[in-house]
Amino acid sequence: MRTSLPLVVDRTAGIPLHLQLAEQVRAAIRDGRIQAGHRLPSTRDLSREVEVSRAVAQAAYDQLHAEGWITGRTGSGTYVADVVPLPPAAVQRARPRQEPEPDLLTLRPGIPFIARTPDPGWRRAWREVSAQTPPRGYADPAGLPALRAALAEHVGRVRGIACGPENLVITNGTVHGLRLQLATTLAAGDLIAMEDPGYVNAAKAARSHGLEVVDVPVDADGLRVDSLGDDLAAVYVTPSHQYPLGGRLPVARRNELIRWARRTGATLIEDDYDSEFRYDVAPLPALAQLDLDRVVHLGTLSKMLSPSLRLGWMVASTAVVDRIADHREDASDWPAWPMQAALLAMLRDGYLDQLVRRSSRLYAERRNLTCRLLAPYGEVVGQDAGLHITLLLPDHVDDQVLAAKARAAGVAVAPLADYRRSIPGPPGLVIGYATPSDEDLVTALEILAGLLS
Ligand SMILES: Cc1ncc(COP(=O)(O)O)c(C=O)c1O
């Protein structure tokens, strides 16, 4: 049976006529108006009916033929192919990744202050990048050699780690560095010790690699090294500013930790997320400075510039660096060249140092304000460094209920309970003072003080 279809072309549509015809035939087959085996008009008839040239009709059939919608050859007729139409797929609705918080003043920890207008140092770096062409081919999977050299100098100067570019891997931030280390040196079922309370994303990363997380208590000085068992494969630790309680691991405990790792063969993963910001005395040199054979050190741009840049670095033994470079070669997951090139420009230009000095002055004032306004309501801890303080509250307070009340009053703040896993401790609020504007910070702290009183 020869099927007559109501085909039309629109010469003003800006879409080639043969593609318009092909799409109408395709749609008719898809929704069952014409079915397998039905005969289509010859190109001569089609061109006459639709008033297009024969070449256009032929091009439409060629397209449909190439896609498998029709069969047949010139002279023997053109037929709808045996294509069983697919029922339409269920409509996928995207789940919002994060609840939008447009009207909330945020005191959530971890995000630095980002000015609304870009400053000259930032612009200079990107101008420098835009004046270059990208490297030919795939870059070094450990990271740009020049950036690794500049970072080796940087961590030597500011964190006391004696190392060279061969000890550096450029990462997409701390958690990425942690995941690279877990993927290349640990096996499912291995035990990894983590501070409790501690960084939630680190524990999630470990679990998603099949590791068993062993909760280790912390005190005012940080990780309780005397609680580590001998069956651990690794320890994840925040020695410069325990997250979130703020302890600084003293020298004696650092030495004890290194001695323990040398004896047991475990790897220490040092998360050095906010050591740049220290308000009392200079930070202690990094743990990695004591023994690069036992410590993998993770640094990040997230607190200095912005977490959205997704850039960080790992300092480790050459054996670890080589293993990770091999792994990345297979996975193709190293940071994009422009971001690496921009960080290199910022380091060479002194912009990063300047930014840290400037932000430290701002954060020191905000920290003073935060401590002053909140000290009457609890015990402030962790105030000597970083971008947050923790306010420990009386035992009868439910910090999650308090955070929900703060939210209802327009302030986003993190309850300490969210950082705890199995080890009990006092309730509290983890309060980041870096993100809001000066005015918003005052407003948010006053709202919080009102709730606490
Ligand atoms: C303890 C800790 N480590 C690291 C980071 C930063 O992670 P990343 O470098 O992946 O952005 C954060 C951010 O909040 C943190 O709290």
Image (cartoon, rainbow, N blue to C red):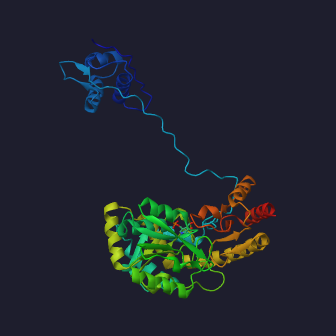
- Image height check: is 163 above or below 12? below
Location of the N terminus by quadrant is top left
Q: Is residue 393 left or right of residue 338?
A: right
Q: Quarter of the picture for ligand 1?
A: bottom right
Task: Give the mark count.
Answer: 0
- For the residue pair 281 and 253, the one nearer the viewer reads as 253
- For the residue pair 187 and 57, the one nearer the viewer reads as 187
Q: Position of residue 112 (x, y in %)?
A: 61, 68
Q: Residue at x 45, y 69 (%)?
A: 192
- For the residue pair 222 and 63, the one nearer the viewer reads as 222
Q: Position of residue 364 (x, y in %)?
A: 69, 77
Location of the C terminus by quadrant is bottom right
User: Can residue 40 be seen here?
Assistant: no
Residue 334 placement: quadrant: bottom left
User: Can residue 257 be seen here?
Assistant: yes
Spot the residue most to the top.
Answer: 1
Residue 326 placement: quadrant: bottom left
Q: Residue at x 30, y 27 (%)?
A: 60
Q: Is residue 108 left or right of residue 68?
A: right
Q: Position of residue 440 (x, y in %)?
A: 74, 62
- For the residue pair 40 and 308, the one nearer the viewer reads as 308
Q: Position of residue 130 (x, y in %)?
A: 46, 65
- Image height check: is 74 above or below 155? above
Residue 149 placement: quadrant: bottom left
